[in-house]
Amino acid sequence: MLRTARVWFTTLLLGAAACSAAAQDYPSRPIRLIVPFAPGGATDIPARLVAPKLSDALGQPVVVENRPGAGGIIGIEAAARSQPDGYTMLVATNGELVMNPSIYPKLPYDPFKDFIPVSIMVESPMLLVVPASSPFNSLGDIIAAAKEKPGALTYSTAGIGSTSHVLTEMLAAQAGIRLLHVPYKGGAPASQAVSTGEVAMALLNFGSAVNFVKGGKAKAIAVTSAKRHPGFPDWPTAIEGGARGFADAIWIGMAAPAGVPREIVNRMSGEVAKALRAPDVRERLAQLGGDALGTTSEEAAARIQREFPRYAEAIKKANIRPQ
C-alpha cells in the first residue's frame, strides 16, 4: 500500500491532464459535494460553509449531498464511481482518506488510485475529556492510574477504526500506557458515554467536546495540538501532560475522482482557498475549534504522503482491525 501511495503521489506531481473543451467551459451545470456522513456533523459543516461561496464564484449551484452509511464507505464509493468531469467532489476526513486503507483490507475504493486531492480545507485538534465527576484532573493523573492498572481504564470512540480510536491508541503509545477500548455506534453515543460516566475518558472532536465542557458534563484534560488552543489557553496540550511527541489533528479535505482534468482541480482548489478566507467562514470554523487551511492540491498530496506511513505503523502496532 505504501508503494501504491508513492506511485500515486509521483503521478500526481508529474502528470498533467490535457486541456479539454470541457475543462475550458467548466462549470456549465451544478456541482455536488458528497459528504459521506449525516447533516450537521463535523465533516458536513465545512462543506456547507464553502458551498455558497463556491456557487457565487463559479456561477453555478454547489449542492451538498449527504450519503451516510458504513462509516463513510457508501458515500466515498459513490464519489469514486462518479464521472471524472469535475461535477462531483468528495468532502471527507483523514480517517477515510489516509487511515482506512491500513484498517480495512477490502475497501470498495482506493483513495490513492480513485481520487485526486483538491485541498485540505480545515484541521482541528481533538480534546481529551473525562466525566465531570472524575478524580482525574490531568493527563498525568490518567497516566499514573493506567500504569498502576494496565488495561483497566476505559475510553469511548465512534467505533472500531474511527479517527478517535486510532488517535487515542497513538496517544496511549506515546504516554507508555494501555487503555481499554469501548466502541460505540457513532460520535454522539461515544460523547454521551463519557458525560454520563460510562467510560473513564474520550478523545472527542474539539467542537463537540467544548460544548460538553461548557455545559459542565465533562472536564477538559488535554488538547492534541502542538500548542495550546488560543481560544482556551488554560487547557494544556497532551505533550505537556506527558505524551511526549504526540500532536495530531483531524483534517477535512476535498478530493475529486481520478481523471478529473488538472485545470479543474486547480481551479476548484483556488476557489476553496478563497472561500475559506472569508471572515464569516473563518469565524464559524474557529468557533468549532477548526483552523481554515485551503491548501493546494500538491500540498494536500504531500501531507497525505507524509501521514500515511505514520498512521499505518500506529494502526499495525495497535492491531486495529474491523470486526
Image (tube, grey):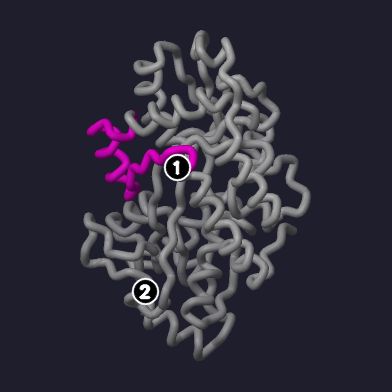
Residue 38 image point, x, y percent: 53, 36
What is the crowding at mark 2: few (fewer than 14 residues within 10 Å), some, or many (at least 20)?
many
Amino acid tagged 1: Ile
Quarter occupied by the N terminus: bottom right
Q: Quadrant of residue 110?
A: top right
Q: Which residue is the extreme one toward the right?
A: 106
Q: Is residue 180 left or right of residue 103?
A: left
Residues tagged 2 and 1 counted as in contact (Cβ below 8 A): no
**Circle 1 sits in a helix, a strand or a loop, which is it?**
strand
Cα gap from disc 2 to disc 1, whole angstroms: 25 Å
Q: Is residue 259 left or right of residue 139?
A: right
In magenta stretch: residue 288: yes
Quarter occupied by the C terminus: bottom right
In magenta stretch: residue 255: no
Residue located 28% across and 34% down the image: 277
Residue highlighted by disc 1: 120
Residue 206 image point, x, y percent: 37, 54
Residue highlighted by disc 2: 239
What is the crowding at mark 1: few (fewer than 14 residues within 10 Å), some, or many (at least 20)?
many
Amino acid tagged 2: Ile
Q: Quadrant of residue 234?
A: bottom left
Residue 116 image point, x, y percent: 58, 36
Residue 85 image point, x, y percent: 60, 20
Residue located 46% across and 62% down the image: 203
Upstream in sequence: badge 2 or badge 1: 1
Residue 41 visible here: no
Q: Is residue 290 left or right of residue 301?
A: left
Which of the numbered marks, if any, corresponds to residue 33?
none
Q: Quadrant of residue 112?
A: top right
Q: Which residues are magenta?
A: 275-298
